[in-house]
Amino acid sequence: MDTQLMEVIYDKHKNTVYRTAFTYFKNTADAEDITSEVFIKCFEQDSNYNSDEHLKAWLIRCTINRCRDVLRSFRYKNHVSLEEADLVYETPEESTVYHAVMNLPSKYRIVIHLYYYEGYSVDEIAGITEKSSTAVQTQLYRARNKLAKILGEELDYEYSGLQRSNRPSGSKRKMQRRGI
């Protein structure tokens, strides 16, 4: 692989790989380490990818696998975590949503990240995470419910990017069917 192609691939996908790793570790040092490792692995392989989307999906899958490996490692289980990175938020809502997403369990964080921040569909996330579409839908549903409980009703969900479903709850649906 020539140097120019490596630069193009790195520049195009570095943020996606970094953000994916950051959702697992919640600190910049570990996320940067994983990002470096993933790109080194990518550049050492002499694989031809069918499309840019195929390469992006491979990078995300590789990032997820590497994060899981590190989380299972002795080094990670027996370390003192770094303080949270100093991030700049444009609005208080962004900070609130970010912290709420980061406090979700890992399985919910990754699907929220891929769906809302990377723009993948449920089927694409299922392929990347090697889960069924139904499992991804369930995790998204549960993650949204957890976020709604954490964030409360005062947050503007449309602004935050976490739009709530317009579908009424069970009792409201029954009342609508009955014409109440």
Image (cartoon, rainbow, N blue to C red):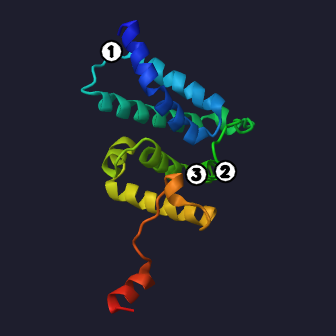
Q: Within the image, what quadrant is residue 177 found in? A: bottom left
88 above or below 149? Answer: above
**Residue appearing at x 42%, y 76% in the figure:** 168
Q: Is residue 85 above or below residue 100?
A: above
Q: Which sits earlier in the primary sequence, circle 2 or circle 1? A: 1
Image side of residue 29 versus residue 113, left or right: right
Q: Are marks 2 and 1 in contact (CB under 8 Å)?
A: no
Instruction: Read off the residue under disc 2.
Output: 92
Q: Which mark is residue 68?
A: none
Which amino acid, mark 2?
Pro
Question: What residue is shown at x 34% (from left), y 28% (from top)?
Answer: 55
Q: Is residue 151 left or right of residue 174?
A: right
Mark 2 vs mark 1: give the one in front. 2
Query: Quick one: label 1 or label 3, which is nearer the N terminus?
Result: 1
Q: Which residue is mark 3?
A: 101
Three-letter residue code for mark 1: Asp
**Tag 3: residue type?**
Val
Q: Which residue is mark 1?
A: 46
Which SS class for mark 1? loop
Question: Residue 133 location, x and y as percent?
Answer: 33, 54
User: Residue 3, how many percent across, how many down?
Assistant: 41, 7
- Residue at image position (38%, 82%) is 173
3D distance between C-alphas at marks 2 and 1: 45 Å
- Mark with earlier residue (3, 2): 2
Identify the element where label 2 is drawn.
helix
Q: Is residue 72 visible?
A: no
Which one is closest to the eye, mark 3 or mark 2? 2
